[in-house]
Structure formats: C-alpha cells, structure tokens
Image (cartoon, helix red, strand yellow):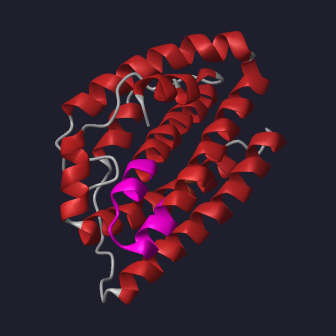
Amino acid sequence: MPDADLRARFGLRVPTSRTWVEAVVADPVATLVDHAHCEMKAATTALMMAARYAAFPEVADAMLALARQEIAHYEQVAAELRRRGVHPEPHGADPYAKALRAHVAADEPRRLVDLLLVSSIVEARSCERFELLADAAVDAALRDLWSEFAVCEAGHHALFVGLAERLVGAESVARRKDTLLDAEAVIVASLPCDPRIHG
Ligand SMILES: [Fe+2]
Ligand SMILES: [Fe+2]
C-alpha cells in the first residue's frame, strides 16, 4: 500500500518495511502460527469488551458479532496450519498490541474510547500487512487467505472508528486517534522484523 494510501485510508504514519516482508515470506509457517494467535486474541478481546461494556448495547452487540468473525478467522488459519502438520503452541503476549495498550486511559469513559481506537489501529496495521503478505505469497492458498483477511480487517477498522465516533463525536476521535497513531509509528519502528504479523 503506497504511503499516501496508508495515510488516507487509516492515518498510519509509517509503512511496513521490506525487511519485515522478507522475514515473513522466508518463514510462512511461523507467520501463520503467529497469525492464528492474533485471531484468537482479537476474538478474546472482543468478548472481553462485550462483557465489560454490556451497558453500551451498540458496543456489546458489535463486539459479540466481531468475536464470531475472529473465531472463524482463527479456524481458517488453524486449518491451514493443520494441512501443514503444525499446531499452534501456547504463545506469549503480542509486543505490538501490548505496547499500544499501554496508551489506553485508565478512567472511563476515556478507557472505552481508547480501547476502540487502539483496536482500530491494530486492524488497520493488520490490513496493511495482509495486503503485503498477499502480494508476496508464492502459495495460492495463502494468497487467497491473506487477501480475504485484508478486506475483513479494513471493515473492522471502520467498525471500531464508527463506534468511537458515535460515543464521543468525530472531532474528539480524530484528535485522540492522532496521538495514538503517533505512538503507533514509534512502536512499529522499535520492533524487530520477526516472522510475526505485528513483528
Ligand atoms: Fe481477524
Ligand atoms: Fe479483525
């Protein structure tokens, strides 16, 4: 995704490096294992939000529907791994998501808005990376999988931003998103280029 597109579609400040693309293409199985964990974490985060924010039916309902989609994504990636005779091992925290979550406000209602916006940024970065993976994939099955997921993640990005805007308005969201996007650029630049979705 060219720089200008990345900014226009998602506000992301920096494109993913070619070094990351080379690392993931060199080890598609490690990338898929990490990808499976990302989908599982996306599902559990959505369920956690549905439980915590049951008093916000629009948020809770959207999170339940999202959790179902993320579980289906997990199943697709796990099936792809099984075809290769691999089972995802238990996995530690995602350093990228963990570093972004450190910016989430502790007090409500700012916390809810921040959680929605941090999730929107994770989805945006995932979309960019799935597009890069689809372009670079030599395996047709992986190319199809990653292309399909790139479209879903773009939709999830819009879902999270829309929920936040309905809570506090577009102007507040734009201001807060700007700060979080600046933080995201620093985090992306600080992470090693490992074969991980957010490596
Ligand atoms: Fe997903
Ligand atoms: Fe997603």
The quarter in which the N terminus is drawn is top left
Say whether residue 34 is left or right of residue 52: left
Instruction: Look at 55% across and 23% down and name the residue there.
Output: 8
Provide residue 117's location: percent of width, then percent of height. Answer: 57, 30
Instruction: Look at 66% across and 31% down and name the residue there.
Output: 161
Magenta span: chief secondary structure:
helix
How many marks overall? 0
Say whether residue 154 is left or right of residue 96: right
Say whether residue 58 is left or right of residue 153: right
- Identify whether 29 is placed above or below 157: below
- Identify whether 149 is placed above or below 153: below
Say whether residue 145 is left or right of residue 54: left
- Identify whether 168 is placed above or below 137: above
The residue positioned farthest toward the right in the image shown: 57
Provide residue 107's location: percent of width, then percent of height. Answer: 56, 22
Closer to the camera in the image, 11 or 139: 139
Q: Is residue 140 magenta?
A: yes
Query: Which contiguous range is marked in magenta?
Result: 131-146
Q: Is residue 105 visible?
A: no
Q: Quadrant of residue 185?
A: top left
Provide residue 166's location: percent of width, then percent of height. Answer: 79, 26
Provide residue 106's location: percent of width, then percent of height. Answer: 50, 25
Q: Is residue 130 visible?
A: yes
Q: Quadrant of residue 52?
A: top right
Q: Quadrant of residue 2?
A: top left
Q: Is residue 134 magenta?
A: yes
Instruction: Look at 19% across and 54% down and name the residue there.
Output: 23
Closer to the camera in the image, 132 or 186: 132
Instruction: Look at 47% across and 61% down and name the residue there.
Output: 146
Closer to the camera in the image, 170 or 151: 151
